[in-house]
Image (spheres, helix red, strand yellow):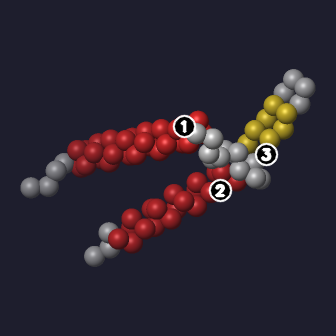
């Protein structure tokens, strides 16, 4: 018997949360170890004035978007019958 849709959706949300938590911990540990982390890539916009600072990680956003697209495509490709 198949599990209800809400149970499957809840399971997906829980797994996604655990993966995001693990990824966040890895990024935090990597930055403490002196590894260059995401968010400070060449091409990210950073402006620091006298009383104002602005930061927009455009290259980091593009990289993460491409990575997420690749992962989603790979999952859909492997789930085909």
Residue 47 vertical position relative to residue 4 in the rendered view, above or below: above
Q: Is residue 24 left or right of residue 48?
A: left
- Tell me which corner region of the image, top left, top right, bottom left or bottom right, holds residue 63: bottom right
The reply to whether callout 3 and callout 2 are in contact (CB within 8 Å) is: no
Disc 1 or 3, which lies upstream in sequence? 1
| Residue pictured at 79% horizontal, 35% vertical | 54
Under circle 2, the secondary element is: helix
Under circle 3, the secondary element is: strand
Which of these two is toward me, 10 or 74? 74
**Number of residues whose C-alpha sits closer than 10 Å to that of mark 3, classed few (under 14), some (14–19) or many (20 or more):** some
Disc 3 or 2, which lies upstream in sequence? 3
Q: Would you say residue 32 is visible in this rendering?
A: yes
| Residue pictured at 39% horizontal, 67% vertical | 76
Which numbered marker is on residue 40?
none
| Residue pictured at 19% horizontal, 48% vertical | 4
Which of these two is toward me, 2 or 71? 71
- Please identify the residue farthest to the front as the structure is shown: 33
Q: Would you say residue 37 is visible in this rendering?
A: no
| Residue pictured at 43% horizontal, 39% vertical | 21
Which numbered marker is on residue 28?
1
Which of these two is toward me, 64 or 80? 64
Query: In the rendering, at what x and y percent does residue 1 appear?
Result: 9, 55
The residue under label 3 is 45
The residue under label 2 is 62
Query: In the rendering, at what x and y percent does residue 56 appear?
Result: 73, 42
- Tell me which corner region of the image, top left, top right, bottom left or bottom right, holds residue 65: bottom right
């Amino acid at each position: 018997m198949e599990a209800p849709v809400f149970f499957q959706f809840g399971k997906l949300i829980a797994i996604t949360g655990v993966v995001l938590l693990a990824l966040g911990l890895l990024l935090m540990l990597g930055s403490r170890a002196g590894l260059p982390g995401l968010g400070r890539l060449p091409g990210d916009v950073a402006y620091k004035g006298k009383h104002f600072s602005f930061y927009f990680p455009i290259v980091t956003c593009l990289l993460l978007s491409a990575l997420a697209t690749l992962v989603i495509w790979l999952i859909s490709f492997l789930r085909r019958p």
